[in-house]
Image (cartoon, helix red, strand yellow):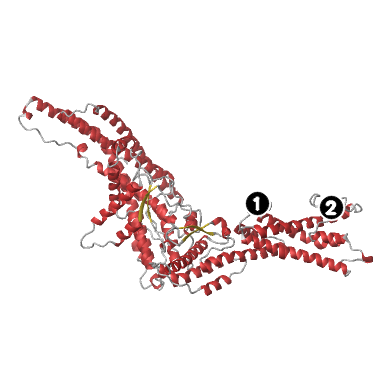
Amino acid sequence: MLHEILLSLSGQPSPLFNARTEEGLVSDDAFPLLSPPEKALLASLARLSRLHARLRAHTTAISSSHASVICRSVSTAISTEHLGGFQKKILEVEKAILVEDSGYVGGYGIVPLSTIVGEFSPWTRRLEWLWEVVRFILPDPKASRNQGCAGAALIDRLRSESQTGYVDIEEMALHLVRIAETAWMRQVSTWLLYGNVPVLGKDDFFIQEDRVSPDTAQASFVLHTSLLPKFVSPQTASSILFIGRTLNLIRAKRNASTTRPSGLPTYPVTLQGEHVEYLAALQSPIASSMLSNAVDAIRLSLSQSTLSKILPLPKILEILSVLHDFLLLRRGEFAMALVSHADVRLQERPMAARTKAVDGLGGLSVKDGDVMATLGHALSELYSLQSEEDPVDDALDLAKDLLRLSVGGQSNSTAAGPAELAGSGLSPDISQVAFDDLLFPAPTCLSVQVGPPLDLFLSTSDISVYSKVHAYLLGIRRAQIRLSGLWKHTFLRRNHPSPWGPPRSNSAFGQNMLSVGRQRDNTRTRQMRPVWATSSASLFLLSEIGSFFQAEVIQGSWQHFQTWIEDGQPSSPTSSRPGTASSAQSKPPDHPDHSTTRPPRHDPETLTVAHRRYLFALVQSLFLTDVPFTQSLRSLLKRVDHFVALVIRLQTIQRNMDLETDEGVVDALADYAGEETELWQALGAARGRMEVSIREVVARLRDIDDSRSAEGREIFALGQRTHPSAESWTGCAGPDGAHYVPRKTAGVDRLLMKLDFGNANGSRV
C-alpha cells in the first residue's frame, strides 16, 4: 500500500486514488479493508496526487502552446523547480522507508500512515497555490481559442501574491517573480539596446509594430498599457518607447543610406556596453524607481551621443514655430486668406447661393481638390504679402512643405496616438463637439506631415490635438470675419441716393417718388436696427473670446514655453497676473542659486514630455475640455452662418424690389415681396436664436469662473498638483526632477470683465 501511495503521489495512475471519484475521496473498491480513519488520512494524499497530475498536464500545455514567453517561462519553472522539488520529496520519503529510518519506520517494520501524511501536508497548500497560478495563466487548455493571460498580468499577480503570511508561498512567489521578470527584461533589453521588437512573444510585448509606410523603411510603433506591468511608471514606459524608436530610426536610416542617399545623418551608437550594465544592475523584484533610473540613464546617454545630432534643438523650434504660426493662427493673415478662399471656392460651385439661403452650407459636396486648392491659394497669398526688404520667409517655406488640408476630419486616427504616450488610452479629455465642418460643409482637417526624425518629437496624437485646436480657433475667427463683412454691405446700413435734378424733381411725380423712397428707407432702417444690434453683440462676444484665446492664452503660453526651451532651465509656474514680472526680478542676478549657472539639460525626450504638458495646458486654457461651453459655442457659430446668409439674401431681394419699383425691371417668375416677408420672419427667428446662444455662452463662462473659484485652484497648476489625466498623458518629471511647468494664464474673470463692460455700453452681451 505504501508503494501504491508513493507511485500515485508521483503522478502515476493508481486504483487507490481513482480519478473518477470525487475530489479528495478514496475509492471504496480499491481497498475495502481500510477503516474510515485511514480513508480520512488518505484523502489529503488523494488531493495531492490529483493536483500533481493536473499540474504536470497543465504546465506541459502552457509551455508548449502559450503565446507569452513570460507565461511559458513561469510554467516551465513550476514544472522543473517546484514540482521537481515535490518529486524529490517523494524520493526522500521512499529512501527513508527503504533504509528503515526511525523517523518513518516504527517497531516490527510498521510505517504509520499518519507520518506519511504529516510529511506531505505542507505541500498541499503549495500545490493548491501553484494550481491557482497555472489556472490563471491558462484557464482551459482544451479550448484552442483561449489564449490565457498576458505576461504583464501574470507578473502583477505574482508580485501581489508574494505579500502573504506563509513563508513557503512567499518564497515560491518571489522565485516565480524572478523568472517572469527575467523573461520580461530580456524582451525589454532587445528593445532598449537594439530597437528591435522581440521575435519570441512579440504579441505579448507592450510595444508592438503598428504599420510600415510604403515610402519609407521606418516602422511605426505603439504602446499598449494592457500589456504593461504595474511597476513600470508612465514616464518610464514613454522613455522606453522613445529609446527603441530612436534606435530603430538610426538602424533604418543606416540601412537606407547604403541604397539611396538620405538627408538624415546617421551616427553609430557606441554605448551598448554601458547600457547593458545599467540593465544588469536591476534585481528582482524590480523596483519602479530603479527601473526608471536605469532607463533615464540610457536615454540621457543616447541623447548626448546621438540624438543631439539627429534631432537638434533648432529643428525642434522650427517645427514648433510652424505649428504656432499656422495651426494656432498666430499669423492672422493665414486665417483670413484661408476663410476668404474657402468662401470663394464654395461660391463657384453650382447652386451655392440657393443652398446657402436654405440651410447654410449643408448640401454642398467638397472634394480633395477643392480643399487642396484653397490651401495652395492661401499660402500663395501669404507669399505675395512678403516685403521686398525681407523676401525670405523660412517658416512659410517649411509650412508649404508640411501643411496638408484634407477632407474627412481627423484623418490621422488618434487610436494609436495616445498609446504612444506613457498613459496609453488617456488623452486629454477634449470635447467631441466637432468644429471641423465650419470652413467647408464637409469635415476637413489641417495637419502637419511629420517624418523622421521629427516623429520622435511629435506623435500622431499631438498633430491630432493641434488639428482640433486649429478647427476650433478657425471657427471663431471665421465667424468674426463673416460678421464684420456684414458692415461692408452699405446698402443695408444706409441709403444715400443722388437727388433727382430738375425737371423730374420739380414735378409732382418726382416729389412723390422721393417721399416714397425716404419712407421705404426709414422703414428698412428701423427694421434693421435689431439685426445690427444682434450682429454687433455677437461680433463683440466672439472678438473678445478670440482676443483672449490668442493674446492671453496662446501667445503667453508659447512665449513661456519658448523661453524655457531656449534657456534650458527648469521652469517655475509664472503667472500672468499684474505684478508677476516685477516679482520675477526680485531675485538679484548674482544670487548663488541663480538658474543661469546651470547648464542646459533638455534632451529630446524631456522636450517631448514638456511639449505635451504645454499642449495639455493649452487645451484646458482654451476650454476645449468643457463640453457645455463647446456645445454652446458651436451652436452660436452655426447660427451666425445662418444669420449672415439670411442678411445677404435680404439685401439681394431688396435690390431686386427697388429695381422693380424704381426702374420697372420686373421678373414675372419672382415674388420678391413675399420672399421679403418670409425672410423677415426667418431673420427674426434667427436673431432670437443668436441672442439665446450669446446668453448661453456667457452663462457658461460664468459657470466656469464660479466652479474654479469654488475649487480654489487654477487648472494649470501642474507644478503643485497635477491633473489626473495630465499626469498620465504627459508623463512625469525627468531624471533630474526638473520638468516643465506650464504658464498660468489669466482667469475667466478677466474675460468676463470685458464682456460686462461691453454690456454696460449696450452691446447686449
Percent coordinates x, y for residue 552 in the rendering: 34, 54
Hey, which residue is sitting farthest left in the picture?
503
Q: Are marks 1 and 2 in contact (CB under 8 Å)?
A: no
- Rendered image quadrant of residue 658: top left
What amino acid is found at the position of numbered circle 1 in the picture? Ser
Q: Is residue 76 left or right of residue 202?
A: right
Quarter holding the C terminus? top left
In the image, 371 versus 744, the foreground residue is: 371
Hey, which residue is sitting farthest right in the picture?
108
Q: State the SS at label 1.
A: loop
Q: Is residue 77 left or right of residue 201?
A: right
On the question of residue 579 being in view, the answer is no
Q: Is residue 586 left or right of residue 57?
A: left
Q: Can you say whether 88 is above or below 651 in the image?
A: below
Residue picked out by circle 2: 26
Lower sequence index among marks 1 and 2: 2
Hey, which residue is sitting farthest top in the picture?
508
Q: Residues within 10 Å of mark 2 (few under 14, many from 20)?
A: many
Residue picked out by circle 1: 144
Q: State the SS at label 2.
A: loop
